[in-house]
Image (cartoon, rainbow, N blue to C red):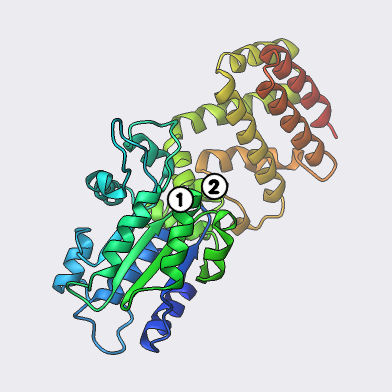
Amino acid sequence: MRFDDVIGHQGAKERLIRMIQEERLPHSLLISAPVGSGEMMLARALAQYIHCSGRAPGATDSCGRCPSCLLHQSLNHSDLHFIFPVLKKKNQTDTLSDDWLADWRDFLREDPWMDFRQWQSTLGNPNGQPKIYVHDAEALRRKMSLSARSSDVNIALIWLPEKMQPETANKLLKLIEEPEAGSMFILVSNSPAEVLPTIYSRCQRIELRRLSDTDAASALADGFTPDANQLAAAHLAEGNVIAAREEAGNSKDSALFLDLFMALMRQAYARKIGELKKWSEQVADLGRETEARFLDYCQRMVRENFIYNLKIQALNYMTGPEQQFSERFCPFINERNVEQIIAELNEAKTDIQGNGNAKIIFFDLAIKMIMLLKK
């Protein structure tokens, strides 16, 4: 992983490179970011840059060609030690990251964005609660006490230190407070507030912001120019590439939701009570989880249509079909009704999640739309 492979975070990259070139890199570093921001990719790029043996003086990235870089790319560098949350295996007293190392390498190759739910599934229990156990801290102490084999620095890359057991965190604290010569700890967190405060205070911190919508959409496009659907998905996911990927993958649901949204608004405006009753029955057959997502979609479309009235294209994130409908519909969403429409949609979602009668909830919502669209 090279810095050039990491989307966004240009300021953080420059800061890290400057630290290394000026020999000011601390022995313990905490990189924190919202989920789906590419924080682990940045940490891996940093480790490869530190170990790169072919890097020219003043170079702002690892060479990608030397033996060290090739070992990093295959996730087999002898001086890079991974620690990550795992589940206990049956009939095993010691629980170590190394027990899952082959699965971990496959996981990193397949999904460098680090979807924790996917990692739970990889561990064999989607509902499990992976932890970093105390045996990992003990094993890491032994590894870091040995001299680096093929570089000058032993690097421990710890994913999600907030998942440490208290005993683990206390042992790691001792390693950070009294580091072996030529050792470095890179901690990668999505919840830094949950990291042991004494560890947090002893690490130099790199705090990453969420990716911009454009950067997140470019990750979905995989090197190509993102389309309107990918931009809309990134916007809805607030820069979280993992969530945006799921949103973009739900294209069939999005098409259905748009059809249902258009039917609701058209029939409500025309006051077709009988059609709205049929509509509410159709939506009620979707199932509660899908119904809740549909109501989220409706809220997004209402907001987008309100903003569409401003005629500033850069502020809108809609697909082609959504925009085509909104060109004529947007005037009906205005400052007199937008807040109340959003409130009614949100209340309907709360009622659905509270196991209310879906047919009644959606028919009541439809009748309210009749009155609100006339404001």
Question: What residue occupies the far left of the structure in this picture?
Answer: 67
Query: Is residue 165 visible in the rendered structure shown here?
Result: yes
Q: Quadrant of the C terminus?
A: top right
Residue 139 in picture, x, y percent from top left: 30, 56
Element assignment for label 2 = loop
Residue 99 in picture, x, y percent from top left: 26, 44
Q: How many discs mark residues in the rendered view?
A: 2
Residue 166 in picture, x, y percent from top left: 51, 51
Res 269 quadrant in image? top right
- Residue type pointed to by label 2: Ala
**Looking at the image, do the residues carrying marks 2 and 1 touch, with CB atoms under 8 Å apart?**
yes
Q: In the image, is residue 99 above or below residue 223?
A: above
Q: Would residue 46 be found to the left or right of residue 369 on screen?
A: left
At 59% from the left and 20% from the top, the residue drawn is 288
Residue 237 badge? 2
Residue 82 in picture, x, y percent from top left: 31, 57
